Image (cartoon, helix red, strand yellow):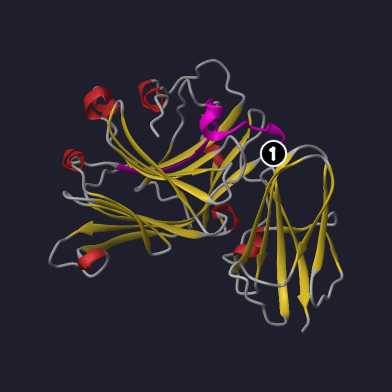
Amino acid sequence: MTFLFKPLKILLITSLLIGEKPYRGAEYRTSNTYQYGRFEVRMKSAMGSGIVSSFFTIRDFWANGLSNTVHWREIDFESLGKYTDKFQTNIISAYENHHEQLHTLMYNPHAGFHTYAFEWTPDYIDFFIDGYLIRHEASDYIGSFNTGQKIMMNIWQPIWEDWVGVFDESSLPIYAFYDWVKYYSYTPGSGHYGTDNNFSFEWQDEFNYFNQNRWEKATHTWSANNAQFVQENAVIQGGYLILCLTDNSSSGYMGDPLSNHSITNYVDSEGLIVYPNPFNNSVSISFEIPNSKRVNLSIFDMKGRNIRQMNLGVLGSGLHKVLWDGKNDFGNELPSGIYMAVLEVGGKANIQKISLVK
């Protein structure tokens, strides 16, 4: 599906405020450009209707005074926070030439860290998630991607509800987490990584500090973005880049210190009731929500693997109960052990331990 709004995104980029924006977002981008290669990120995308968090490359044609009608080139991983089982890829080859695809996943991408990568060569662009090829593009327009692009990551709040869903500002602050970024140059015939070993490792940033020789923090916005990018919302903490979406009176990361273990990104919830616990055949997971929200329930094992995904859709206010039969997504019975129930409501998540005894 092609959305005609995205040309506005680039056309109206400015370093000045277009009126006062209701929210503050963040963008992190390289100072240098890169032509061809394999681009990788390990990220935990932001969850919530109305939110986009991303990893992409783009030709900064506007900085050189070039027209987006002809010179716009962009390669995207775009996480639409309203989906708990989908991720979007996009290749933009000119002002009105968007090649978007929405990919259905077997898990909630916002519930933990995953590795996203794309290979850009003169002949094709391939997209990968956790090492699996999800999209191959070798159309004629790929040949027009022949100039360098900057690597970028951002979090923002688009105005288009038909694309990203209705935004609930009560879910703020919202964060996207980036563990590392890697770049491999395109070296056909002499590489050691990627498809046909055609790529060679160049650098990796693990976000232990703000490397000002490599990265810049953006301070612009555009008319279709309800968030103003501010430097304070691109935070380096605990070995992560954290891109923050806040209201316009606050900024920065206000959460708890992070761990590489995806489960520990959540906090215990007194409102998540599990009974009986321990359980044998089935367990009741009860929770109460104050108003209508999109709800997702995931079960993790102690290795951080998402073994059961229950997308509950939009639920009304009040008390709700879900039964879990102790099986994984494939209907297989799980062994005795400790599991984690992760309840995600309106962009926020809570966790409760469950003991399965056979």
Residue in the image at 39% along x and 46% along y: 212
Is residue 146 or residue 107 the one in the foreground?
107
Place of residue 67 in the rendered image (x, y in percent of width and height, measured from the top left): 24, 22
Residue furthest bottom in the image:
358
- Of 210 and 142, nearer the camera is 142
- Give how far across and how far down residue 40 sits, in percent: 37, 57
Q: Can residue 25 be seen in the rendering of this structure?
A: yes
Instruction: Decide which of 149, 238 is in the foreground and name it.
Output: 149
Percent x, y of residue 25? 54, 35
As drawn, the residue found furthest toward the left would be 189
Residue 272 in sight from this viewpoint: no
- Point out the residue furthest to the front here: 331
Crowd around label 1: few <14 · some 14–19 · many ≥20 (10 Å): some
> Could you tell me the amino acid type at mark 1?
Ser
**Image quadrant in which the C terminus is located:** bottom right
Residue 165 falls inside the magenta stretch: yes
Q: Residue at x 73, y 76 (%)?
A: 338
Residue 172 point in image, percent of width and height: 67, 38
Q: Was residue 206 drawn as part of the magenta stretch in this picture?
A: no
Identify residue for label 1.
171
Left-right relation of 103 to 175: left
Point out the stretch of residues depicted in magenta: 150-171
Q: Horizontally, is 192 left or right of 265 in the view?
A: left
Residue at image coords 40%, 22% = 8
Please name the residue shown 55% across and 26% down the image: 226
From what the image shows, is residue 19 above or below residue 345?
Answer: above
